Amino acid sequence: MNFRRGLARDEPEINLIPMIDVLLVILIFLMVTTTFTRFAEIKINLPTAEANKPLERPNEVQVGIDTQGQYVVNRTPVAFRSVQAFAEELRRASAHMNEPVVVINADANATHQSVVNVMEAARLAGLTRITFATQGPPK
C-alpha cells in the first residue's frame, strides 16, 4: 500500500555551502603554506672587444668550432671521436709550448656541448688556462 500517494516528493538537491567552505579552507591553506621563490637567473652580458687585435702570441693553442660541430686545432681539421682522443690532439699541439693558453673560437650557433667537450679535453690534457675569443662590435 502506498500511503504517500497524494504527497509530492521533494527532489534531492546538493547543498553547495559546505563544499564551498571546504574549498575556501583548502585555498587559504595553500596560499599560506606556499612559498613564492624567484628563480635566480644568470644574467650574461656577452663580451665585445673594442681594442686593437693583439699580436700573435706563440703560446696559444687555437681551437675552432663551427655550427656543424667540426673542430679545428691550430688551423688543422681534427675529427672528434671522443674527449680522450681530442685531449691527445691538444697535448700534441701544445707539446713544445711553455704554459700554453687554449683559445676557443666557437661559432655563435655552435652547441654548448661542443664547447664543453673542448674544455673537458683541455682539462684532461693538463691545460688549465682557457679563454674565449670575442669579436668587435660592428662598425
Image: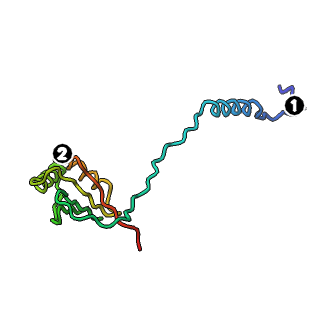
Of 3 and 36, nearer the camera is 36
Q: Quadrant of residue 46?
A: bottom left
Residue 62 coordinates in the image, percent (x, y): 21, 60
Q: Quadrant of residue 80?
A: bottom left
Residue 97 coordinates in the image, percent (x, y): 12, 54
Using residue 124 as the reference point, say whether residue 25 is left or right of it.
Answer: right
Query: Which residue in the rendered view is the most extreme toward the bottom?
Result: 139
| Residue located at (26% from left, 62% from top) | 65
Q: Alpha-carbon distance for marks 1 and 2?
A: 94 Å
Q: Is residue 11 above or below residue 50?
A: above
Q: Is residue 97 above or below residue 3?
A: below
- Secondary structure under tag 1 reads loop
- Secondary structure under tag 2 reads helix
| Residue located at (33% from left, 62% from top) | 134
Disc count in the image? 2
Using residue 35 as the reference point, say whether residue 79 is left or right of it.
Answer: left
Q: Which residue is mark 1?
A: 5
Q: Is residue 12 above or below residue 71?
A: above
Q: Which residue is mark 2?
A: 124
The C terminus is located in which quarter?
Answer: bottom left
Snapshot colouring? rainbow
Labels 1 & 2 near each other (Cβ < 8 A): no
At label 1, the amino acid type is Arg
